[in-house]
Image: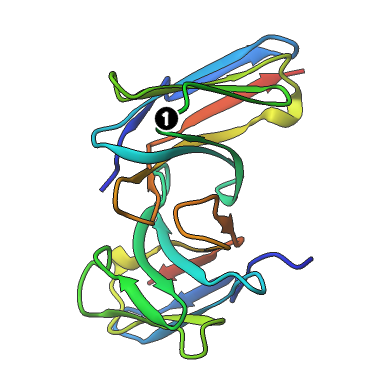
Amino acid sequence: SQQGEEDPQALSIQEGENATMNCSYKTSINNLQWYRQNSGRGLVHLILIRSNEREKHSGRLRVTLDTSKKSSSLLITASRAADTASYFCATVKTGANNLFFGTGTRLTVIP
Amino acid sequence: GAGVSQTPSNKVTEKGKYVELRCDPISGHTALYWYRQSLGQGPEFLIYFQGTGAADDSGLPNDRFFAVRPEGSVSTLKIQRTERGDSAVYLCASSLETATEQYFGPGTRLTVT
């Protein structure tokens, strides 16, 4: 079963704009991770944020985590056409080791 | 270095047949995971290995599904008496430590006709 949901389900923006995706989850977590997937295959890890962290940056990516609201957001700044993909948040529940994925956001960046 | 590899990339089989899907993790990664992804959905956890043992198989949908990792490296996911509902992309991932970032293979697309 899915752990949570991403919002929006689909997002279309112009190249150079920022893209924000949100993720909600249901249980206490060890950490939350964001992955990118192109063409329905090949998930690529983007960033990991631990439950005791509130914000993390990696290049053009900024992730926030609010454990009181059980939610996270992924911001991609200055988007590029190559950022077009599906983005998934995934949580590692407290005491577990595997990932529980959300339903994903399909991002389209228009050149 | 080499990433996670999975074979075959595509598998078409008839309902009722037996299939084996192989995963070769990144060298030195002790944790190995299998997930299943249906169209338009996020991956769903099937089973997790730490070394040779299945540490968590709570995601296996029923007893037709079984996985092994006899030498703590390569893993095989085995599906008996396949059903059309088993059609999905089967993803394998490995990680150096548990509860950290996972490295995914390209997946095996299984189609049961």
Q: Which quadrant of the structure image shows residue B23?
A: bottom right
Question: Residue A10, percent across and down?
Answer: 48, 23
Left/right placement of residue A84 relative to residue A33 reads right
State how many labels appear.
1
Q: State the residue at coordinates (43%, 66%).
A: B34
CA neighbours of label 1 inside 10 A, class few (<14), some (14 to 19), many (20+): few
Of helix, strand and loop, which one carries label 1?
loop
In-front residue for pair B81/A60? A60
Q: Which quadrant of the structure image shows residue B86?
A: bottom left
- Whether residue A61 is situated above or below residue A33 in the rendered picture: above
Q: State the residue at coordinates (58%, 16%).
A: A12
Looking at the image, the residue that sits furthest to the front is: A52
- Whether residue B94 is situated above or below residue A16 in the rendered picture: below
Q: State the residue at coordinates (48%, 75%).
A: B12
Q: State the residue at coordinates (53%, 72%).
A: B30
Question: Residue B25, percent across and down?
Answer: 60, 72
Question: Residue A97, percent across and down?
Answer: 38, 56
In-front residue for pair A52/A17? A52
Residue matched to label 1? A52
In-front residue for pair A36/B88? A36
Q: Which quadrant of the structure image shows residue A24?
A: top left
- Whether residue A99 is situated above or below residue B69 in the rendered picture: above
Can you say which quadrant of the picture contains the C terminus of chain A? top right
Looking at the image, the residue that sits furthest to the bottom is: B70
| Residue type highlighted by circle 1 | Asn
Question: Residue B61, percent across and down?
Answer: 23, 67
Figure colour scheme: rainbow
Chain on which label 1 sits: A
